Image: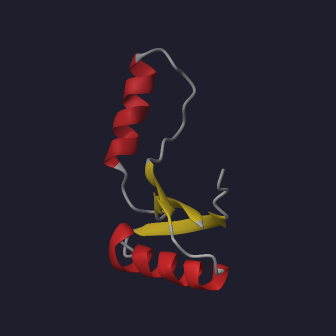
């Protein structure tokens, strides 16, 4: 199975990287950008065919390592890996 994990800062958590991106876009002439929030995208391929076990493993990975759950939210999608 393949997992695509999106990690974002929780609402209310300051996002200095998002602010820097917003200022840079403004300096480049992109007016009208009201807010930028920056996050992470992680792709993981698991040697697991059982969706329930795959969900459990990815949740555990996010909780223990990939996301700082105090300040970040995470969500993921699982899809089967197509072999050629």
Q: How is the image coloured?
A: secondary structure
Q: Is residue 78 left or right of residue 20?
A: right
Q: Residue at x 33, y 73 (%)?
A: 65
Depth check: give the residue in front, 22 or 48: 48
Q: Residue furthest front?
A: 84
Q: Position of residue 27 (x, y in %)?
A: 39, 18
Q: Which quarter of the figure has residue 80? A: bottom right
Q: Does 24 appear above or below 44?
A: above
Which residue is located at x 63 percent, y 64 percent?
77
52 or 71: nearer the viewer: 52
Between 67 and 16, the residue placed more toward the observer is: 67
Q: Quadrant of residue 79?
A: bottom right
Image side of residue 54 versus residue 64, left or right: right
Q: Is residue 9 above or below residue 23?
A: below
Query: Is residue 27 positioned above or below 51 on the image?
Result: above
Q: Position of residue 71 (x, y in %)?
A: 38, 69
Is 82 left, or right, of 38 in this rendering?
right
Q: Is residue 24 left or right of residue 30?
A: left
Residue in the image at 43% along x and 53% along y:
40
Residue 35 percent location from the top left of the image:
51, 41
Q: Measured along the vertical axis of the image, is residue 21 above or below residue 58?
A: above
Location of the N terminus by quadrant is bottom right
Give the residue displayed 43% in from the left and 33% down from the top. Answer: 22
Residue 67: image x %, image y %? 39, 69
> Number of callouts in the render?
0
Between residues 2 and 34, which one lies in front from this camera angle? 2
């Amino acid at each position: 199975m393949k997992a695509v994990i999106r990690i974002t800062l929780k609402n209310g958590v300051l996002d200095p990287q998002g602010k820097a991106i917003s200022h840079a876009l403004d300096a480049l002439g992109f007016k009208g950008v009201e807010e930028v929030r920056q996050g992470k995208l992680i792709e993981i391929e698991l040697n697991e065919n059982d969706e329930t076990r795959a969900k459990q493993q990815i949740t555990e990975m996010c909780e223990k390592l990939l996301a700082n759950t105090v300040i970040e939210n995470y969500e993921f999608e699982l899809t089967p890996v197509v072999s050629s």
